[in-house]
């Protein structure tokens, strides 16, 4: 029986800039007993730009594979994505640029029989991107995609093109995804079909299983192979701060209005003031509270617009502030509503 | 004129002096403004309202040139005659003055706002009246790009006493996050089907944002939030659908979460690398 037994340790930090670090490794269950270990360190940024959600990932990975010769590969990858809604559809444009190299060395273990290939090295280059069109139909998410990559990996160099479709849906607590992608590689055409099911066993534990017919990997050039895998993912710990501090916190009722806290991170400003429709656009100084600038006000029901004035000079509205709206003169205001009644 | 100092330096006390008397704003006043259009308010309240409007305009008069002030008064009077809220117009003029915007550009934006308020009024009017707060919120939503059809749908399905202003604002917040309009309306339908609590509305965009940052597409995040609300767990309980860790769609073309070679397979023929030919080095 051929197979791998392995695991992955993932450490990440969520937020507008999410960082993660993971190590993944395993050992072949066949007679060769070969081993592999990979490490990935990267960051993902998320930003709203008008009606686009832009995110992207930058990561570096390294792989060490001993079987019994050593194979090493590494690359720096940049994969930005822009997403926006177009009517009922979600359009995603993705790109990927990866640059790195690979090397095959001598036997990994003393006394082991050398593979016929040794001391070779080359570059890894992948450039490409694609478009995806998705839409939710009930609780099912359907997506179609196309992608083209130009690859240099020392094994299967040339243009890879893909046309695919996928669906994700839930049955009870289980999430199921099905994917079929036709890949046109420089050598051949390959149909990659995969199915995966995952379910939360508890708030920290996810169990999953997947099967895939496989395809030639355009980045590493590794050959097509069918896989079936079972796994468990256990979240050991989680940071409480998974999103930005809210700029506006609407608190308890005071008379007809509400107590409202405005707060932004300190940054390098020496003075921060709040100005809005509720101050008649007069700057109201905020007080420093550790690494925050804070101001508490009681506001009447209605829609309120506001922004911050840094050091008496610069109009500033954080990107994650609520209700961003053009002020009509090329800047943004934030806005929120205090509802009348309980 | 002293300006809000994004373009010219400004001191806070100068702006205080510039803007002069503070105005006391209340939603009662807004409600009264709408009632003027309906012609139903008592004379005593009308006097109070007139004083309020005069107070607003007096502040604007202190910061706008006479010609511009006349135009602003005409715009306010026209809006008042049509039953539209006038406070947003005066407020916009004050905002523009505080930000150092030239008078003609202030008036252009005020006129555009008056048109938006009129469109908003037409969308939310029922039995000849519309709450000023709702009209103002809908005008804001129109400026934020919310389709009028979506506002009509949301308003058409609302029950009496429902917080329309907050619901429309929430709809705009969801669309801002890239949620398709039909999915955003479904999130609000879920909220409505589970009690339509105003406080829960504020949690919806935050919950969607959290899931987006965890890697979900906006539409998927919103659908997950709608499911959580319908299940009675609340928006904060929404989770990104569990996914196979190696199947993260943000990882691009290649995956390093799998062994680089299948177990037992021979090395691929890496004939294009640099270095010793196969078999020529013992390593």
Image: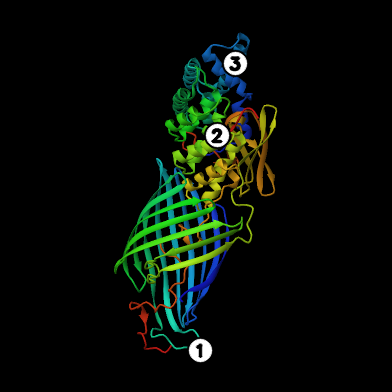
Mark 1 nearby-residue class (10 Å; few <14, some 14–19, many ≥20): few
Q: Is residue A321 visible?
A: no
- Whichever of callouts 3 and 2 sits on the residue coming sooner in the sequence is 3
Farthest residue toward the top? B43
Q: Is residue A317 above or below residue B108?
A: below
Residue A274 appears left or right of B172 = right
Give how far apart the Cα atoms at labels 2 and 1 are: 70 Å
Residue A70 drawn at (x, y percent): 46, 80
Disc 1 and disc 3 on one polypeptide chain: no
Percent x, y for residue A252? 69, 35
Asked whether B80 or B69 is in front, the reply is: B80
Name the one closer to the observer, B254 or A295.
Answer: B254
Residue B203 is situated, as x and y percent measured from the top left of the image, at 59, 41
Query: Mark 1 — residue?
Result: A110
In percent of width and height, residue A319 lies at 53, 45
Q: Chain of mark 1?
A: A
* Residue that label 3 marks: B49
Q: For numbered disc 1, what is the local secondary structure? A: loop
Cα–Cα span, label 1 and label 3: 94 Å
> What number is the disc on residue A65?
none
- The local crowd at label 2, few if under 14, some if 14 to 19, many if 20 or more residues have their Cα within 10 Å, is many
Q: CA distance from mark 3 to mark 2?
A: 35 Å
Front one among A278 and A39: A39
Question: Looking at the image, do the residues carrying marks 1 and 3 touch, with CB atoms under 8 Å apart?
Answer: no
Image point 42% across, 75% down: which residue?
Answer: A102
Q: Are dots 2 and 1 on a single chain?
A: no
The label number, if any, that marks residue B192 in the structure image: 2
Give the position of the C terminus of chain B as an image quadrant: bottom left
Tell me how the rendering is colored: rainbow
């Amino acid at each position: 029986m051929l197979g791998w037994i392995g695991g992955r340790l993932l450490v990440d930090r969520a937020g507008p800039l999410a960082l993660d670090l993971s190590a993944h490794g395993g050992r072949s269950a066949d007679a060769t007993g070969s081993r592999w270990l990979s490490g990935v360190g990267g960051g993902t940024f998320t930003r709203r730009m008008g009606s686009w959600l832009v995110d992207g990932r930058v990561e570096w990975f390294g792989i060490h594979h001993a079987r019994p010769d050593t194979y090493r590969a590494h690359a720096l990858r940049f994969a930005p994505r822009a997403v926006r809604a177009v009517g009922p559809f979600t359009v995603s444009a993705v790109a990927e640029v990866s640059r790195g190299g690979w090397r095959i060395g001598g036997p990994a273990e003393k006394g082991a029989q050398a593979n016929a290939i040794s001391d070779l090295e080359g570059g890894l280059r992948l450039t490409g991107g694609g478009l995806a069109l998705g839409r939710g139909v009930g609780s099912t998410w359907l997506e179609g995609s196309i992608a083209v990559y130009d690859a240099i990996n020392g094994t299967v160099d040339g243009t890879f093109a893909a046309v695919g479709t996928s669906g994700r849906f839930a049955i009870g607590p289980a999430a199921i995804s099905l994917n079929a992608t036709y890949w046109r590689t420089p050598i051949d055409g390959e149909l990659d079909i995969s199915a995966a099911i995952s379910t939360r066993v508890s708030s920290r534990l996810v169990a999953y299983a997947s099967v895939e017919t496989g395809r030639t990997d355009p980045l590493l050039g590794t050959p097509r192979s069918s896989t079936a895998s079972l796994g468990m993912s256990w979240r050991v710990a989680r940071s409480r701060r998974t999103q930005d501090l809210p700029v506006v916190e609407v608190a308890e009722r005071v008379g007809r209005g509400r107590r409202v806290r405005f707060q932004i991170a300190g940054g390098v400003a020496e003075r921060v003031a709040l100005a809005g429709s509720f101050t008649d656009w007069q700057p109201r100084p905020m007080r420093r509270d550790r690494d925050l600038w804070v101001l508490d006000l009681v506001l009447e029901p209605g829609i309120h617009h506001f922004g911050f004035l840094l050091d008496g000079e610069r109009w500033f509205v954080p990107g994650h502030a609520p209700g961003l709206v053009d002020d009509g003169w090329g800047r943004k205001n934030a806005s929120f509503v205090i509802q009348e009644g309980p | 004129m002293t300006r809000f100092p994004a373009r010219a330096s400004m001191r806070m006390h100068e702006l205080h002096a510039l803007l002069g008397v503070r105005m006391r704003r209340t939603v009662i006043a807004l409600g009264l403004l709408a009632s003027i259009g309906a012609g139903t308010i008592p004379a005593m309240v009308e006097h109070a309202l007139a004083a309020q409007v005069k107070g607003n305009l007096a502040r604007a008069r202190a910061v706008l040139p006479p010609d511009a002030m006349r135009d602003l008064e005409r715009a306010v009077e026209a809006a008042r005659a049509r039953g539209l809220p006038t406070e947003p117009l005066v407020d916009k003029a004050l905002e523009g003055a505080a930000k150092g915007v030239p008078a003609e550009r202030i008036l252009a934006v005020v006129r555009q706002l008056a048109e938006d308020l009129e469109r908003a009024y037409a969308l939310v009017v029922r039995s000849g009246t519309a709450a000023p707060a709702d009209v103002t919120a809908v005008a804001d939503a129109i400026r934020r790009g919310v389709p009028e059809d979506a506002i009509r749908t949301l308003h058409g399905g609302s029950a009496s006493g429902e917080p329309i202003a907050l619901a429309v604002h929430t709809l705009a917040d969801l669309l801002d996050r890239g949620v398709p309009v039909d999915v955003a309306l479904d999130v609000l339908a879920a909220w409505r089907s589970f009690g339509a609590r105003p406080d829960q509305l504020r949690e919806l965009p935050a919950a969607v944002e959290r899931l987006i940052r965890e890697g979900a597409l906006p539409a998927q995040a919103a659908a997950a939030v709608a499911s959580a609300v319908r299940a009675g767990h609340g928006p904060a309980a929404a989770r990104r659908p569990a996914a196979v860790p190696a199947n993260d769609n943000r990882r691009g073309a290649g995956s390093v979460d799998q062994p680089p070679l299948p177990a037992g397979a021979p090395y691929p023929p890496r004939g294009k690398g640099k270095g010793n030919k196969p078999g020529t080095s013992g390593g």
